[in-house]
Image (spheres, helix red, strand yellow):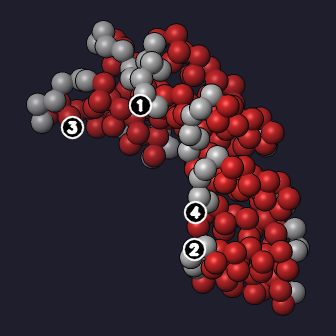
Amino acid sequence: GAGRVSEFFRSRGFGLEPQHTAVVMKLCAQAGDVDGARRAMAELRSSGQAPTLACFATLIDFCAKQGDVPGAQALVEELSASGADQVPGAEVLLSTLMSKAHAKAGDLSSSLKLLESLRERNFQPHISGYCTLIKAYANQKDPAGAEMALRACKAAGISPDRSCYAHLVKAAVRANDSKLAEAHLEEMRSMRLAPDKALRDLVQKASAA
């Protein structure tokens, strides 16, 4: 829990500092202990210190993965009010996390709009936002939407990675379009993004059905 990890830092001569709290919070969140992460941030505040962007980002990311858009938005507003968002990279990080939250919640149009708004303000979106969006379309068995998200990724000047293409292939398979899945698999190979055995087997099984 948060207390145990905090004690670990103290036992080694580290005081309660924002950077250490950020580490504690991330470890708690990774273990699914979001309450522990919140307690760690509350303890930092009670010491008279302000949570950093990294502290808030951990909680926002947890909300995003749960598809909790209101929870994530409330944290973004709290972060903005604290002034901790006035650091380089904050705009991209927060918009990407909110995009992920909307995608997880099934609001894919809002997810894409957030990424596109970054481009309009001359910020470079992060590939993880597009990958999450493509995966969300795949989960909805919408290969056309997945392709649209991939095109948006390319239009942003980002080269889609293996994970993006894998979700694109899965979108076609889930829509029972084996020919499209095979075409995407070939596109992966042409991009030198060799598909792994599990993905190849998935397409092979779909084609044989």
User: Residue under circle 3?
Assistant: 8
User: Residue sitting at 45 percent across and 46 percent down?
Assistant: 31
Q: Earlier in the sequence, mark 2 or mark 4?
A: 4
Location of the N terminus by quadrant is: top left
* Element class at badge 4: loop
CA separation in Å, label 1 and label 2 = 32 Å
For the residue marked with disc 4, what is the amino acid?
Asp
User: Residue under circle 4?
Assistant: 161
As drawn, the label of residue 67 is: none
Q: Is residue 56 visible?
A: yes
Q: 10 Å neighbourhood of mark 4: few (<14), some, or many (≥20)?
A: some
Q: Is residue 186 left or right of residue 29?
A: right
Q: Is residue 5 left or right of residue 163?
A: left
* Element class at badge 1: helix
Q: 10 Å neighbourhood of mark 3: few (<14), some, or many (≥20)?
A: few
User: Residue sitting at 40 percent across and 34 percent down?
Assistant: 25
For the residue marked with disc 3, what is the amino acid?
Phe
Of residues 139 and 33, which is closer to you in this image? 139
